[in-house]
Image (spheres, rainbow, N blue to C red):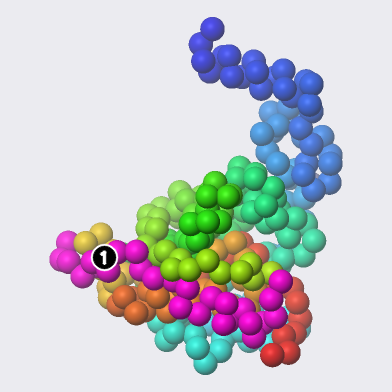
Amino acid sequence: MLPSLASSAADALAQLLFPAECLLCRALLPFDRSRDLVCPLCRHRWRPVVPPWCERCGQPEPLFGRCRVRADWPAPLQCARSAVWLDVAARRSVHALKYGGLPRIADHLAAAAARVTLPLPAGRAAALVPVPLGPRRLRARGYNQSALLAHGLGTRWGIPVAELLVRTRETATQTALTPGSRLANVAGAFEVRNAEVGTRSGSAFPLPRSTFVLVDDVFTTGATVAAAAGALEAAGARSIMAVTFGRATIPDFTS
Ligand SMILES: [Zn+2]
Ligand SMILES: [Zn+2]
């Protein structure tokens, strides 16, 4: 039997024995969508973040909490946009991507994130830069969820992915931290992997003349994208944007 036939027969058998269900609502998935993890209805329930919003941090004010721009936002970080509000359904999808070992879900998230429009300047090279994981977390998870998202976005937008950043130290997971300690947690945690990038003539992404779009799964306080943008700025980037799948719905941060 041909390998493709063998694998589709194996898929069919698996589907018969273990019918695929939506990760979120447990509805059975149609046979031809059995490799999906989230049913179309649940994806439809993700609530898009819509304008009017702050042009810089992308936070619709005032109903959804105050502007996320802080004094420590690097000047080249021009705008941050998110596709959907991180309410229960979207949060479970991100959780499945990060902690459930289900990297295939990244493509659904990327499809939603691809609806975001960024004011990319015409005629400038652009690259998608995933927010990196530390080596320990990368080994434990086996993949960087932000890199998967970036590749899904890159395919849809026709923009190359450049994994330019590294984490210089492991940081505690941001979820358990207060807004103030989130900043301290990620400050100085990123570095451009190759200091040569962009400085040589003929480089694919000249740092001063390209636009770098940071890609992450979730935007909460903006501390992570600000720290990552700071590393790009220190290496010479002059035009930085950020896109995330989810945006925290927490209406107000008090610190
Ligand atoms: Zn569902
Ligand atoms: Zn703002």
Q: Is residue 46 above or below residue 65?
A: above
Per the rendered image, the range of residues in magenta is: 176-202
Query: Is 184 on the left-hand or right-hand side of 46?
Result: left
Residue 165 to residue 61: above or below: above
Give percent across and percent down for residue 201: 15, 66
- Across and down, in percent, residue 61 comes to 69, 85
Q: Mark 1: is the Cβ under 8 angstroms from ligand 2? A: no
Which residue is tagged 1? 197
Secondary structure of residue under mark 1: loop
Asked whether residue 181 is drawn in magenta, I would say: yes
Residue type (three-letter) at the residue carrying disc 1? Val
Q: Is residue 54 visible?
A: no
Q: Residue at x 73, y 89 (%)?
A: 254
Instruction: Note whether residue 171 is visible.
Output: yes
The image quadrant that residue 63 belongs to is bottom right
* Image height of 49 relative to 142, above or below: below
Q: Residue visible at 78% across and 26% down? A: 18
Give the residue at x 39% y 70%: 191
Relative to 62, 197 lies left or right: left
